[in-house]
Image: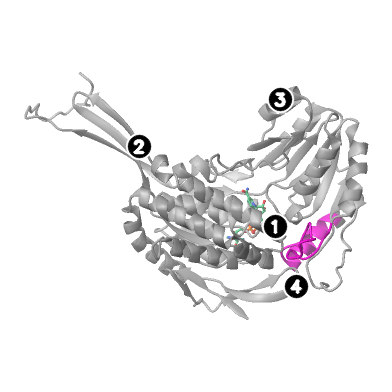
Amino acid sequence: MNAIGHFIGGKHVAGASGRGGPVFNPATGEQSATVALASAAEVDAAVRVAAAAQLGWAATPPLMRARTMFKFKELLEKHRDDIARLITLEHGKTHEDAKGEVIRGMEVVEFACGIPYLLRGDMTPDVGRGIDTWSARHPLGVVAGITPFNFPVMVGMWMAPMALACGNAFLWKPSEKDPTSSMRVAELLLEAGVPAGVLNVINGDKVAVDALLAHPGVAAISFVGSTAVGEYIYTTGCAHAKRVQALCGAKNHMVVMPDADLDQTVDALMGAGYGAAGERCMAISVAVAVGNVADRLVAKLAPRVGALKVGPGLDPQSEMGPLVTKEHLAKVKSYVDIGVTEGAKLVVDGRGLKLQGYENGYYMGGCLFDDVTPDMRIYKEEIFGPVLSVVRVPDYDSAVKLVNDHEYGNGAAIFTRDGDAARAFSAEAKAGMIGVNVPIPVPLAFHSFGGWKRSIFGDRNSYGPEAVGFYTKIKTTTARWPTGIRSGAEFVMPTMR
Ligand code: NAD
């Protein structure tokens, strides 16, 4: 059995806590590894290693750090397929989808290559007579990233390249469900020239997270995961005077207007609702059918959902792989049971799917509910599986109200040919990322990613320009070079004279 430890000080290190957790291949249901679960003492040791290494890294000119990122990008390109394979073997998503995940992470590395420009300061000469002021951004020190199972590489790469390029040391605590790919990324960062100890991976569960949250040597925490855990991380981290950003759960709506191109809309809903088995924070889980479009929409969707090709992620024929764990599969199926009990109409039922030769894998087929109402749990809660709910509303105003009244506000999309409706939606919808005829409007790396409402805690989005702000602090220097004239001690507030 493969034993996954930690990656600290540039080396693989075995776990020392005596605790470990199983890692499974969701396609077969077989255990593939045991991952070490760090103790508070191991976290403390990793923070010390990172703090010592950070000093030299912070003193390395940004241009040199950028060159390391260029090298890292080259290595990611070279090893993209192998990394994607590691993702598929532990997460379950299809190999093509996993390759896409690596590329989206790589795009953040490309943005981080511009760090000398991004860290440029501001300078004002003559703020007073013979006095100049300049502001520059400095790294925070040791920062930590706590990441979810659903993008085991990409979400860590939303954080690490930016944190490192800004001159910090980074401690990555991946999900204990699929940790292997993050260890591979750590090896590549070392190979690219990030000094040993500047990037460390510490595997673990709540014990490791709590140790990071309380550790005085950790200056900031970036978290991505569920809302309950994110709120806990935000409040606990802030109580320990840390800078915290926590990007959390979602229930993304797609408003389908009566004039939408239905073939395009259905294609978009299939990819956005069932891609990665719905295990994406930007997955569309609610289709809001406006006016008379509902019957036509459901009639076109149902056969497509029923015909989804479900199979192992490494099979190139598969459109959708298994869910991540047996427990998660049971949870998603139980939501479908709840929806039926609540009175929603289950148009396509994927609960019974079995795959020959993969009887122990964590598979289910796509599910489609119609006549879902806002009081139902399947509408209110994040299911995080291949379950799409159709809610019928009479008009545009009711659709926007639905989006805005929901507790989550990660993404929201509208499908229409009406520019006026689209423009109004973009202005009025209370969500952080809006798509107009784009189902999953994830911003590219030179913008930033983040939701509204209970989809985020903290005031900085992830990656892009926001990350430069999050991973640095400003120092403003005021200087003068007096030429022999002494004005004596001043006991009042200096003002311009
Ligand atoms: P999760 O909250 O269970 O776990 C996330 C991380 O927190 C993991 O590293 C895990 O080890 C740790 N953790 C779990 N329970 C903890 C606890 N009680 N105390 C401290 N740490 C704990 O999330 P997940 O199931 O891995 O990921 C799915 C969730 O992530 C979904 O809700 C999804 O919407 C969300 N997500 C959000 C975004 C975003 O950008 N908004 C992106 C991806 C995923």
Crowding around mark 4 (Cα neighbors within 10 Å: few <14, some 14 to 19, many 20+) is some
Q: Nearer the viewer, mark 1 or mark 3?
A: 1
Q: Is mark 4 within 8 Å of ligand 1?
A: no
Q: Are marks 4 and 1 in contact (CB under 8 Å)?
A: no
Q: CA distance from mark 4 to mark 2?
A: 53 Å
Q: Residue 272, percent across and down?
A: 75, 47
Q: SS for tag 1?
A: helix
Q: Report whether the residue tagged 3 is closer than 8 Å to ligand 1.
A: no
Q: Which residues are magenta?
A: 309-336
Q: Amino acid at mark 2?
A: Gly
Helix, strand or loop status at disc 3: helix
Q: Which residue is mark 1?
A: 96
> Disc 1 residue type?
Glu
Looking at the image, which is closer to me, 186 or 203? Answer: 186
In primary-sequence order, the first of circles 4 and 2 is 4
Residue type marked 3: Ala
- The picture quadrant where one finds residue 146 is bottom right
Distance of label 4 from label 1 (alpha carbons): 21 Å
Q: Which residue is at 89% across, 36% downward?
A: 294
Q: Amino acid at mark 4?
A: Gly
> Which numbered disc, 2 or 3, marks the residue closer to the eye?
2
Mark 2 or mark 3: which comes first in sequence? 2
Looking at the image, tell me whether mark 1 or mark 2 is earlier in sequence order.
1
Question: Magenta includes 311?
Answer: yes
Give how far apart the Cα atoms at labels 2 and 3 are.
38 Å
Dot 3 corresponds to which residue? 424
